[in-house]
Each structure stands twice: as C-alpha cells, then as structure tokens.
Image (cartoon, grey):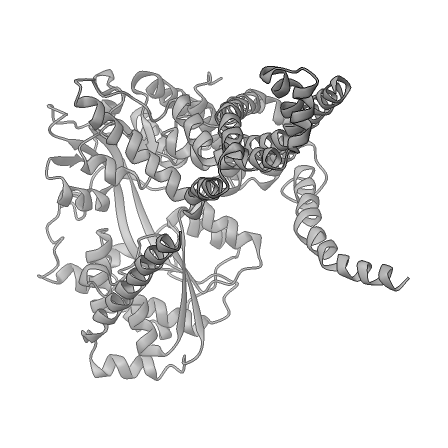
Amino acid sequence: MKQNLSTKLLRQPYIVWSVLFILAPLAMVCYYAFTDKSGAFSLNSISQIPSYLSVFGKSILYGAVATVICFFLSYPFAYALSKAKLSAQKTMVMLVMLPMWMNFLIRTYSWMTILGRSGLLNKFLSLFGVESIKFLGTPGAVILGMVYNFLPYMILPIYSVLSKLDNSLIEAAKDLGCNRLQVFKRVVFPLSLPGILSGVTMVFVPCVSTFYITQKLGNGQIMLIGDIIEMQFQQANNYNLGAALSLVLMVLILICIGVMNRFGSSEENGGALYI
Amino acid sequence: MKKAMAILFSVLFAFSFASCAKSDETADVEYFSDEQKQYYASLGLQGTTVNVYNWGEYISDGSEGSMDVVAEFERLTGARVNYTNYESNENMYSKLSGGGVSYDVIVPSDYMIERLVSEGMLLELDFENIPNYKYIVDDAKGLYYDKDNKYSVCYNVGTTVLIYNTMLVREEPDSWDILWDEDYKDLVLMFNNSRDSFAIAQALLGQDFNTTNPDDWKEAAKLLAKQKEAVSPRYVMDEVFDLMESGEYALAAYYAGDYELMVENNPNLAFCFPKEGVNYFYDALCIPKCTQNKKGAEAFINFMQEPEVALANAEYIYYASPNSEVIANDDYSLKGSEAVYPSVKPNSQYFRNLDEKILGLQSELWVNIIQGREIK
C-alpha cells in the first residue's frame, strides 16, 4: 500500500505536466479548429481544408523522401559505428551530436550562404568553369536541409539498438548455417526495427511540419503545410484555420505512424518466425 | 577529449570576456544636459519596468559607437526596460490580442494603429507627459490613422522603392513593370509579405491599395502569379540586404531607408520611385491597453523624441524622422537624401485597415501564388 502511494505521488508531476503542456494545448487546437472568430461552433475552418490537400500531399512527400534518405545514410553508419572500438564509438557519437549544440536556425541559415547563387558551393564550382547553378529555391535544397538537420535523430536510435544487440544471437545464427547476408536479413535487421521505427518517427514528423527550412532554403518559393500554418497565426491572424490545419496535420501524421508501426510489427513477427 | 573541452571552454571564456569589454566602452559619452537628466530623474520611475515591444533593428542600440538608447533611458530614469522585438504588424497584433501579455510601448504602422484604435486596444496619451511632441512636424500629425492626435506619436516615415543594381540593369527603370521582365529571371527580389507585394501589383493595375472588391484582389493576385512564372522572384525580407549588397540580384522592392543602408555597402545600387506609385507609411509610438506602467511608457515615448535620441535613432534606422530638430540638424548624414527625404513627394498611397474577409482572401491568394496554383 505504502509503495503504491509513493509511486502515485511520484507520478503526480508528470500528470500535471502532460495535462498542462500536452492535453491543454491539444484541447485548444480542437477548440479553435471547430469555432469561428466569435467563439461559436463552426465548421467553416474545417471546410476550407480540401483546398489545402495538395499542400498536405506535398509536405508528406517531402517528409517521406527526406526520411528515406536519412534512413539509407544512417543505417550503414550506425551499423559500422556499433562494430567500432568503444573509444571510437564515443568520439563518433559526440561528432554526430556536435552540430546539435548549435542552434537549428543558425545551421539552416548558414546553408543559405553555402548554396546561394554566389555562395561557397557555386564559387567552388566556378573554379572549374561551371556556370552558377540555382540550388536555393529547389526541392532538392529543402530536402537537403531536412536531411541535414534531422539526420542525428535517425542515427542515434538505430545505433543504440544495434550496439545493445546480443552477439550470441548472431553467433547462433551463424552456427545454424546462415551466411552473412542471411544473418543481417533475418537477425540483425529485424531486431533493429524498433530503433528504425523511432528514428523514422523522429525524422518524419518534424520534416512534415517544418516551416523554417522551406522559408530559408526554398527562397520563399516553396510552401509546405508548416509554412501555411505559420502564416495563419503570424500574418493572417486566422487562428481558427491555423488550428484546423494543425489538427488535420496531426491526424495525418498519426495515420502515417500507425501504418508504419503496423508494417513494422508484422515484419518483426515475420522475423521471429524465421528464428 | 579533455583537451578539446579545454579549448572549447577557453574560446567561450574569451568571447564572454570580449563582450563584457565591449559593453563597458559605451557609457562614457554624455549626451544629455543636466536639465534633461533632472527631468527624467524626477519622474519617479526608479525601480519600475517599461516593456517596449518594437520592430527588430528599429532603435539605436549602441553598436558601432551609436547611442544605446535603451541603456540611456534606464540610466536617466532608473527604470528597467524590457525590450523585445517583432517582425511584422500582424505578428505583434497576434501577441497583443492573444492576451496574457503586458506591453507598455508598441510601434505599429499606420493601418495597424487604425485597427487597434477601432478595436479599443490603445490608450489615449497624456501629452502633458510628452512635452517633446512639440518637435513633431505638422506633416506627421492629424493623419488618417489618428485624426485627433490622441493615440500616437509618429516615430518614422517611409516609402517603398524599387532598388536596382546598375551593373546588371542597363536601363533606368521608372516603373514596377521591370519586375515582370523576363530578362531578369531569377534576379528579382520581392517582399515575403503579402500586403507589400500585393501593393506593387495593385499599383500597376491602377487599383486602390485598400480596395474592398474581391475581384480587384484576384486581379492583382493573377498579376503576381504571372510574375512568379515569368521571373520566379525570390521572396525575402531581411535577407534582401545580403543579396543586394553582394550584387547577386538585379532588382528588389524594399523600403527607402534600407536602400540608403545598402548603398553604403554597394555603391552600384540605385533606386527609383516607380511612376505607378509606392506605399507611404508611418510607424508611430503607442501605448496598448494592457500597459501596467503608463507613466513609464509616456516617458519612454518622450525620450524617443529628445533631439539627441531622435537623431541617434534616425542615423541608425535610416528612415525619415518626423522630428523637426533632426531634420534641421546640419550634421545629420541623411540630410538631402532623395530616397529618404524626396524633394518632390512621390506618387503614393497609404495602407488602411482591411476587414477580416479581405485579409482572409488575401492570405489565401498569397498561398496560391507561392504554390504556383491557378488563381480563379
């Protein structure tokens, strides 16, 4: 009984925290989404959503592309990292984290000076007689910004799962006649799925909702849903439409993650069956 | 590893030291007379806080030997100033109307003052406490946004202009339509701010900037969409400085005062007031209803119009000052600047407050323009 009480007490701050900073804001988003300026119930904002569907689609596409690129960059790196010497691992993990010590906005802004028309990259290329290329304002620049900014969020969870992988399982697989590819396909990869899933979530969600990266690296010429939501709050002062768009975005992200988890868990079962 | 940390810390340490040293330097210049010092000391503001909510880069801040206006105000009055920034009128309005904030001095533009007044969000000023109002020129009093001079003290006056790089633009433009010229594809900078961008299209179409006819706005949006297709302009705000100064871009629409700042770093830049007309705007100091220190706010507004302070601000911001002492000062570096103080007033229009419906339409159209979608 006593222990129960203390665990209950321990839980209190977290409950207060989640009510204040998760549930209350969510309730406010819902409230604004389903009311009009005067505060009366209205479906007006929700009914405007269809005209933004293509933007939602585009945002999810950009987010998906960035996530896939992040995954293919991160997995081999995290795998190699988990096999490296312990001291090397520590240094490398620190190097992965190092850019995160600097503010996200500054890191993104500095890409503008690298990719600009007379930026560092074009200056370098001009040494070889290449004419200046337009990087900023292209989808490639925006996706580059996303990959660059969120790559650590993919590397770290995959690395942490892989580094805790029980080596005896791999040895057992080898003993039972698996070649290296099969070991990877049937043992390592399925066991690293939880890390992949959390990496994918942590990259995909901020990519879909970002607005700063598109503003700066997209020359203001590319608009994703994050930009439109930001505009509703900051420029148009239309909280209701902004909230409605946010709500739909949250639902869409939830669906995407749900689908992903489903796909993930069935894979895992498949993996378990093989073992 | 340890070594790396040691180096890092020593660098950080050096930086913090450098910044300390810098802030020490500024205090030794005395700008004010004993009379002024006495006046501000006698206001009884010691220990109070004044929350000032201003545009970014819109006050002389002590950099490069200029006056640190906020620090001087704190020194003279003994009040503490809590100085914060916003980047657009709409941004400021959102914060203010959202409630739960307390600001004492804000600096909205003309149309936003009109809106704030109509929504009862501003307090009437007590001009007894703002004796320096006498320095404000008559041109900046009794304007459309505050006809009876009750709510605002004009801070800056400005216009939009067309800025061009003479190395890249051979002709001498006199019209906004050069921003639609395909010869300058990828070399054009537009406002990343729907209202200012729309105003350019509206000027070309000969519309009223404040038209309440939705079809006019759609017409203007179509013109902007056409521009996006023809020259694919880059939509920017503050980045305009870097991009025009480096000579990367040929043409930009921006504010006249900022042209003067840019031309200092790139003498190849020139400007014109397009014949179709520009936007003429006023920014003014106001006190919002949520103030908790009206006395302090009025003292701050008064202080901003002290001739010394107004001059320092004018030299820093480069917009036209409505303060007669500044305009008459022979040492003022912008004296005679055609961009900031045009001898012939350019063809221009004011922004007025637009109703919610038009604002909604405007932002919807703007999204469509940027998305490259067809305007219906």
As drawn, the residue found furthest toward the front would be A175
- Nearest the eye: B188 or B177: B188
Name the spot of residue A112 as percent of width and height, x first.
32, 34
In which image quadrant can residue B306 be found? bottom left
Residue A256 shows in this picture? no
- Nearest the eye: B318 or B278: B318
Query: Which residue is found at the position 46% from the left and 16% from the top?
Result: B374
Q: Is residue A18 left or right of residue B142?
A: right
Name the spot of residue A184 as percent of width and height, x first.
61, 20
Query: Which residue is found at the position 51% from the left and 21% from the top?
Result: A65
Residue A134 shows in this picture? yes
In which image quadrant can residue B200 be found? top left
Q: In the picture shown, does residue B80 fall above or below A104?
A: below
Q: In the picture shown, does residue A29 fall above or below B81?
A: above
- Nearest the eye: A151 or B134: A151
Q: Is residue A149 left or right of residue B202?
A: right
